[in-house]
Amino acid sequence: MKQTMVELTEKFVYDQLNSDASGHDWFHIDRVRKLALHIAKEEQKGNEFIIEMAALLHDIPDDKLNEDDAAGWKKLDEWFEEIKMDMDSVEAIKRIINTISYSSGHAKLSSIEAEIVQDADRLDAIGAIGIARTFAFGGKKGQPMYDPSLPIREHMTKKEYRTGKSSSVHHFYEKLLRLQDMLNTCTAKKMARERHEYMVSFLEEFYKEWDVRL
């Protein structure tokens, strides 16, 4: 029964996000799912079914991908009803999804499953993939690639984080370079080191090429 739910959910999420061009497509979801299951295996912790389902569904109610919060959560609730998932599992998955987002601030996570899914999502936001997703999302939002005149925003409300003026390069300082120190599990922290250093090297090269002095 659980495997059937996973397979049905894979198709549902694929249909919802396959055409996304903001870096929140099916391939992002699948990477997060695989990372989360890997972390759970290495840490030998967590309910793998809850982890896998939360990873698959974590972007379905995201306000970036819906008209608003209410529409996103309604879509998720309707899916749970369609597959007839038990309420304990529904509540566990919803608690995970509701607390793992960076824009939610430093919300206290409710479980090891939430820590694992959050780590997996954050790992996919850094490194080479993270760089690619950052510029894809910035382009989708109509933000400049880089604008040296803009300040780096240190403290933001969720609304400011979502809608304030920024650039793709600024996003590294406002979020991505902070993620390595915000991970929960030893496995994720080890995996993050190389990805973090890759972003630092990328920025060094970016500034070198930006400030052309021939």
Image (tube, rainbow, N blue to C red):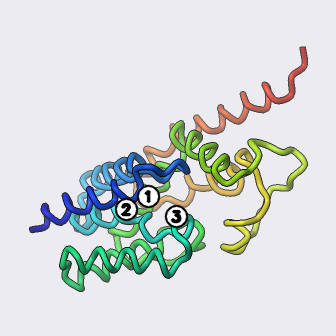
Query: Residue 169: where, in percent of width, then height?
Result: 72, 45
Which type of secondary structure does the marked residue at label 1 adopt? helix
Three-letter amino acid code at the position of disc 3: Leu
Name the quadrant of the N terminus.
bottom left
Residue for point 33% across, 54% down: 14
C-alpha distance separating marks 2 and 3: 23 Å
Say which of marks 1 and 3 sits in front. 3
For marks 2 and 3, the one nearer the N-term is 3
Residue drawn 34% across the image and 56% down it: 15
C-alpha distance separating marks 2 and 1: 5 Å
Give the amino acid at mark 2: Ile
Q: Are marks 2 and 1 in contact (CB under 8 Å)?
A: yes
**Which disc is residue 65 wearing?**
3
71 to 26, vertically: above or below: below
- Mark 1 packing: few (<14 Cα in 10 Å), some, or many (20+)? many
Circle 1 residue: 119
Mark nearer the viewer, 2 or 3: 3
Residue 58: give x, y in percent of width and height. Answer: 40, 65
Q: Which mark is residue 116?
A: 2
Amino acid tagged 1: Asp
Instruction: From the viewer's perspective, tell me whether residue 100 is left or right of residue 96.
Output: right
